[in-house]
Amino acid sequence: MATHFTRRGPQKSGPRLTNRGIVLAAVSILSILIGAYLQERVVTQLALFGLLLLFISFTLCWLNVKKLEVVRLAPSATHAMADFRIELVVTNRKPWLDSFALELEDSLLPYANRGLLANWIRSGGHCRMAFATRLVKRGILERASVTVSSSFPFGLCQISERRRLPTHIVVYPRAITPKRLGYHYDSDYLEGAQDAVLTRDLLGDLHGIREFQHGDPIKSIHWPATARSNRVMIREFDQPMPEKYSIIFHSYAPEKSLIWPDAFETSMELLAGLLYFCAKQQVPLDFTASFNGWRTIQVQDPNNLSGPLNVLAEAVHQPDKSLNQLIKTVKTIPGQHGLFIFSETPVRIWEPKLPSLPRPVTCLDNTDVQVRTPIFGGSA
């Protein structure tokens, strides 16, 4: 949803002479001196006309940018490195004077594409300019400036006004799905497949039939479907849909360990991908993170991930020296939940220290995925 932001207190600066204007001013002053010395009225009159031209240019240049209102239309949220649309609306509030040859430079645009030109805005009229851009880093963008400049008329003077537009754009991390996650989970179950026919029974179990692929076990061939379609079809194993997904992120930094800041940023991108990965199943989810004070965000509508994504946008790396809080949190997760535990610290360091749980647990880091099978009779 787009929101608009108007100007607030432009930083004004008066018109200044361009190189062309400096040359005209110097020639005019020199001509006045020469004309006075030689007593040539024509030379003096031409010099005075040059100074008058500078004064008229100075006045018109100042009036050209006076009473201009700049509004930016921008989305309230976006993902880092994702293109989004922005509009600039420039309105001429002058009651009697048009504006010409306005140059606008928006700091949200890439450097090479910042120059925008409005050739003519009539009195009381407006000009709309749309463009696509992207933001590189996650976070919250509070301010972004627009510079309005003009050298109308004649290019003898130039005036620039920098307007800081109050902006509030939440930049979510770029969403990257962990590549190895599909190796441990049936891709048709979590992501769906074009050739699979999927249905869900009253108990929530998922059933599907797809075409045979190299490596599939022969015992999984669905013979009735094979006979009907004249193609070898495979019966998907029943996959129980969890009541809810629980995603837990922790930063574990044991003694004498070193975690690069880039690893945390990569984790934020993978976490965003994991959120979308789970949301595709249309199952509610809970998100708990150490950088959020171990508070749990409940997402009842999988199509609306703004809650956890907002937290990821503002996340600050706060590593823990122990796993006590993680273990305490894991033990509170109901058994019907599908559980993901994520960290930028390698899985091999912290996974063996987790308690035995009577449910599958997917442990992830930035490069690895390990699935803990349920240990019945273990401590919960």
Image: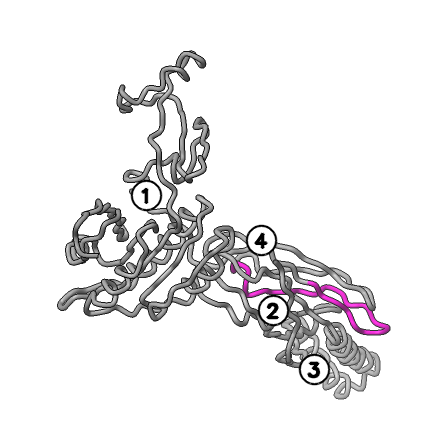
Please, which residue is most extreme toward the right here?
A: 96
Callout 2: helix, strand or loop? strand
Task: Give the residue type that dot 1 points to.
Answer: Lys
Is residue 218 toward the left or the right of residue 243 in the image? left
The residue wearing badge 3 is: 30
Q: Tell me if 114 is positioned left or right of 43 in this view.
A: left
Determine whether label 3 and label 4 are within 8 Å by CB.
no
Between discs 1 and 4, the one toward the N terminus? 4
Q: Which residue is mark 4?
A: 132
Q: Which residue is mark 2?
A: 146
Eye-nearest disc, 1 or 4: 1
- Check whether the beta carbons of the residues at disc 1 and disc 3 lie within 8 A of each other: no
Cα distance, mark 2 to mark 3? 39 Å
The disc placed on residue 179 is 1
Q: Nearer the viewer, mark 2 or mark 3?
A: 2
Q: Which of the pair 210/5 is nearer the observer?
A: 210
247 part of magenta stretch = no
Q: Is residue 288 above or below residue 220?
A: below
Tell me the SS state at disc 4: strand
Task: Name the amino acid type tagged 4.
Answer: Ala
* Mark pair 2, 1: CA separation: 40 Å
Place of residue 290 in the rendered image (x, y in percent of width and height, measured from the top left) = 31, 66
Q: Disc 3 marks which amino acid?
A: Leu
Front residue of 364/163: it is 364
Check contact, mark 1 vs mark 4: CB within 8 A.
no
What's the distance in space between the residues labelled 1 and 3, CA to CA?
Answer: 74 Å
